[in-house]
Amino acid sequence: MSKNWRPATKLVHGGTLRSQFGETSEAIFLTQGFVYDSSEAAEARFKGEDNGFIYARYGSPTNDMFEKRMCLLEGAEDARATASGMAAVTAAILCQLKAGDHIVAARALFGSCRWVVETLAPKYGIECTLIDGKDLANWERAIRPNTKVFFLESPTNPTLEVVDLAGVAKLANQIGAKVVVDNVFATPLFQKPLELGAHIVVYSATKHIDGQGRCLGGVVLSDKEWIDANLHDYFRHSGPAMSPFNAWVLLKGLETMALRVRQQTENATKVADFLAGHDAVARVIYPGRKDHPQADIIARQMTGGSTLVAFELKGGKNAAFAVQNALDVVSISNNLGDAKSLITHPATTTHKSLTEDARVELGISSGLLRLSAGIEDADDLIEDFDRALGKAGK
Ligand SMILES: *Cc1c(COP(=O)(O)O)cnc(C)c1O
């Protein structure tokens, strides 16, 4: 197993653990527990004298393969696979904090992530300040003596803003705080937060890692020291473990992720360019385009564009609804990262629970749509939008 393999090779071979049968495909070890050859062997296992498995809530062979493949791809020392992306985010934040600690978070967060830091954490005495993460000065201003964690997502959902990861990591290191990055939108292929100085990376594996709409999953990655000191016990005893069946599905998802993400990104680029030239569209926000407001930061920290495109219609909500309803190939769904192209109207779905003011702050207007490009033929997607935009009015 080579750390020097390129990503596409790591995705196919990384972490593979063959049983005595020599199977080609990874095996599903759908077992809760493990048996021991003797009392002494059980004692030794519990003492940690060998690194065999004890109980599936702690770890198991299929999950281990998934964790090792993710570590290799991310360049992380260790990982824990969780039942969902939100289990990963919640674990990454709560496992390292206690009452009296303070989080600084970029306010442009996936809705449930925002709930964890804004509503859940304060119930346990963990304070949180939400800021506009685009401006580094805001991170610095929000620092308090008890600041322990910086939390952000980049690019953000749904407006695809980016945060300067190296800049935030530098500030965090000055005060000994940890940077947690939700890297779902960038994917492990296009952005490496650990290399940019972040300490912990989380994914919803539900998105590009599965990529075919089947199961939920998540993963937390970091260095071994941080995981041993923070996540290890939290993970064992609070029980967010992933099902081995899902770990197997996600391993198969990883095998094809580079192919899918490449095609999705190519499609997203073509659709973004088409939309940018259309009369009914007021603006397009796409991290792969030169007119992205933060194109300089994107060039510094990302190696690819995005599978997502945000765009605003001149005709507001009525136009956005009409376009969604007229699309044929593209389905209306709040999910993303799928092989199928999916579109959502954030203001009335994923970001409905925010106040109108919070939506305005984040640039989520009533005419905004978010497309997650799939792996269909790009020309079919463009023809679909061309026809649907005809129904948008002006
Ligand atoms: C989907 C998503 C999550 C939550 O993941 P689940 O697997 O749905 O729990 C967290 N962050 C981002 C950016 C997401 O897109």
Image (cartoon, rainbow, N blue to C red):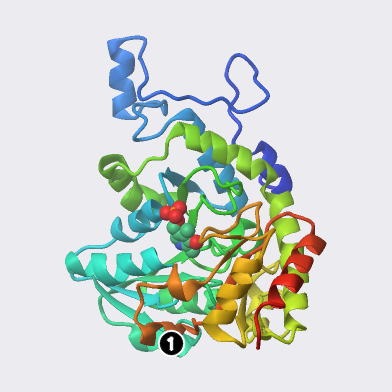
Residue 50 picture location, percent across and down: 40, 26
Q: In this view, does 131 lie to the left or right of 248?
A: left
The residue lying toward the viewer, choosing from 21 and 319, is 319
Does residue 115 appear anywhere in the picture? yes
Disc 1 residue crowd, few under 14, some 14–19, many 20+, Cα 10 Å: few
Q: Which residue lies furthest to the right in this view?
A: 379
The answer to which quarter of the image holds residue 10 is top right
The type of residue carrying mark 1 is: Glu
Q: Residue at point 60% right, 74% down? A: 322
Instruction: Determine the secondary structure under disc 1.
Output: helix
Residue for badge 1: 361
Q: In this view, does 360 lie to the left or right of 155?
A: left
Q: In this view, does 271 lie to the left or right of 142?
A: right
The answer to which quarter of the image holds residue 35 is top left
Residue 164 picture location, percent across and down: 55, 78
Q: Residue furthest top?
A: 38
> Is the CB atom of the residue marked by disc 1 within 8 angstroms of ligand 1's nearest atom?
no
Residue 14 picture location, percent across and down: 63, 39
Q: Residue at point 48% right, 86% down? A: 136
Q: Is residue 25 left or right of residue 155?
A: right
Q: Residue at point 82% right, 63% down? A: 379
Residue 337 picture location, percent across and down: 60, 57
The residue lying toward the viewer, choosing from 142 and 309, is 309
As displayed, is residue 259 above or below residue 318?
above
Does residue 109 appear anywhere in the picture? no
The residue lying toward the viewer, choosing from 223 and 297, is 297
Quarter of the image where the C terminus is located: bottom right
Quarter of the image where the N terminus is located: top right
As displayed, is residue 95 above or below residue 150?
above
As displayed, is residue 72 above or below residue 308?
above
